Image: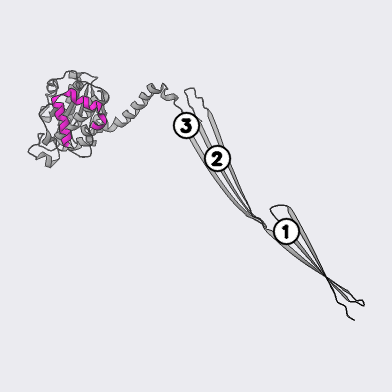
Amino acid sequence: MCGRYSLLQTYQDGSEALYYSMLMKHTRECMPLVYTPTVGQACTDWHKIYRHTPRGLYISLNDLGHVKEALENWPEKNVQCIVVTDGERILGLGDLGSNGMGIPVGKLALYTACGGIPPQACLPVQLDTGTNNEALREHPAYFGLKQPRERGPDYDALIKEFMTSVQDVYGRSTLVQFEDFGNQNAFRILEEYQDKATCFNDDIQGTAAVALAGLIASEKMTSIPLKERAHTHTHTHTHTHTRTRARARAHTHTHTHTHTRTRTHTLTHKHTQTHIHTLAHTHTCTHTHTQVRIFTHTYIHIHTHVHTNIPTHTHTHVLLSLSLSLSHTHKHTHTKTHTHTHTHTQV
């Protein structure tokens, strides 16, 4: 990934117009190479891939008393945006000292590609106050101050001189963005200068500022002020009821009830509230009838004995068939009578 990063820097060395044209036309492809995640590896290896083309201004503790002169020596005079870091908390990589310069360089490249700010109006600044990264400090190619990080009054003095000099050289309206300062310094520096300079801390305020900017920009696209935006709440309620009943007949009843309720609240500055209720009912009934047929067979035997001179024996057979359907009120009676007469004559 650092190879691609270095390739883009080579394009920038040859032609800034070509470099920024690529960023603006192919922002989605180039952004991961110019900034995160590639810039993290670039900062780690900054002392190895550094080139002498001026990409920003390095100001160290050794420049105390001469910070204004350093700013005046920068070739561009109409600086409007400054991104500054002390390299103590670079992304999630920790203290990288002067190698942190990759962060201001990458961030301001996005100012130009995405924000349309001319690159001549952007100034990356690295405040070198030492580093507690011992391995980096002892590397022969590391060009920052080879001393532990300053925690005393000289640190605050450098910050104060830098902020004062920015306003003296470029004016009160010049934006200063604090980037990747350690937590113990980030909050107190912001608190000290937020009312004295045009500044903000990206790690503390950046996300909220971008979200608010998106909302404000949406007003122009929708022509609807934020205070008149509608709030819509949708409530869906589903109720399923199943009941099974068994009696002399088998009866199954399934009842499904779906209730959907949508409520829309429209709030305006006139405090007018409108409720729209949409009720949708779906009623599904399923009836299952089980028919039970009972067949009753009645046999009636009638025996008639007639004693005469010629004895006669009469046998009557009656078959009664009853068919009853419980699911239909229909009775069918079938009567079959069979008479058999047997005559026995005895002399």
To which residue does mark 3 refer? 232
As measured in the structure, the alpha-carbon distance from the residue carrying label 1 to the one carrying label 3 is 63 Å
| Residue 328 horizontal side relative to residue 90, left or right | right
* Of the pair 287 and 213, the residue shown nearer to us: 287
The nearer-to-camera label among 3 and 2 is 2
Q: Please give the name of the residue rendered at 12% of the width and 30% of the height, measured from the top-left corner.
A: 61
Specify the quadrant of the image occupied by residue 325.
bottom right
Amino acid at circle 2: His
For image coordinates 18% across by 24% down, the residue present is 18
Answer with mark 1 or mark 2, whichever residue precedes in sequence: 2
Q: Quadrant of the N terminus?
A: top left
Closer to the camera in the image, 186 or 329: 329
**Residue 150: where, in percent of width, then height?**
15, 35
Residue range in magenta is 2-29
CA neighbours of label 2 inside 10 A, class few (<14), some (14 to 19), many (20+): some
Task: Find disc 2 in the rendering and name its residue.
Answer: 259
Residue at 28% x, 32% y: name it: 204
Amino acid type, residue under disc 3 in the picture: Thr
When the figure is inspected, residue 238 is found, relative to residue 26, above or below; the finding is below
Task: State the residue position of label 1.
Answer: 323
